[in-house]
Amino acid sequence: MGWADIVIELDRLPPSLDESRRHRVLSCIGRFDEVPDLVLELGDDAYVEHGDVDEVRAEHERERLLEAVREIVRPATAAEIGEELDVTESTARSRLYAAVRRGDLVRRGAGRKGDPYCWTRATDDAGEERRREGEQ
């Protein structure tokens, strides 16, 4: 590798982030630091870029969070969602707050004993609002 300006490697994405096993990480090693690692997915005719590993990991965590909230069905606490995701409550809480900022989830409750914060999908609230308006 001493004579090359850059060495390019194509490797598999970790199984925890790629259930389809069709994703690859394009890594570049060399004297140029500007070359980012990219995640590519093998399509029918070519590879499709999905961003860097951190972006893919964040999207994977977002999808898992929304799926966990969907599976619980009712508004759930951070502890319940953390248990569903198999992560700590504080990790679940930080992901939940990020999802609220993105508009994926909404938070209800006062955050105290007897009225804890509970999270639900934002679309559930919009659908509930439309249903209430239709009843009036």
Image: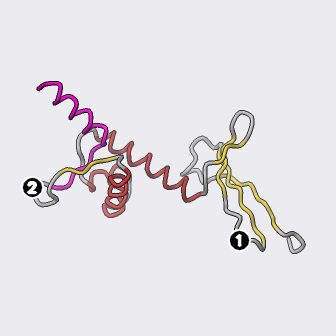
Q: Which stretch is magenta?
A: 116-136
Q: Which residue is mark 1?
A: 33
The quarter holding residue 98 reads bottom left
Measured in 3D between alpha carbons, the distance from the residue under mark 1 to the one under mark 2, in whole angstroms, is 53 Å
Q: Is 1 left, or right, of 106 in this rendering?
A: right
Query: Contact (CB < 8 A) between labels 1 and 2?
Result: no
Q: How many marks?
A: 2
Q: Residue at x 38, y 45 (%)?
A: 66
Viewer-nearest residue: 27 or 107: 107
Instruction: Out of 67 and 133, give the one closest to the viewer.
Output: 133
Secondary structure at numbered mark 2: loop
Would you say residue 114 sits in the magenta stretch? Answer: no
Give the mark, 1 or 2, whose residue is nearer the N terminus.
Answer: 1
Quadrant in the picture for the N terminus: bottom right
Residue type at tag 2: Gly
Q: What amino acid does circle 1 point to?
A: Asp
Which residue bears the numbered disc 2? Answer: 114
- Rendering coords of residue 17 (x, y %): 55, 51
The residue furthest top is: 135
- Magenta segment's dominant SS is helix
Outermost residue, right side:
3
For this view, does 134 lie left or right of residue 46?
left
Point out the image quarter for the C terminus.
top left
Q: Is residue 30 above or below residue 78?
A: below
Q: Residues within 10 Å of mark 1 (few under 14, many from 20)?
A: few
Q: Secondary structure at mark 1?
A: loop
Residue situated in front as seen by the camera: 109 or 69: 109
Residue 121 drawn at (x, y percent): 31, 42
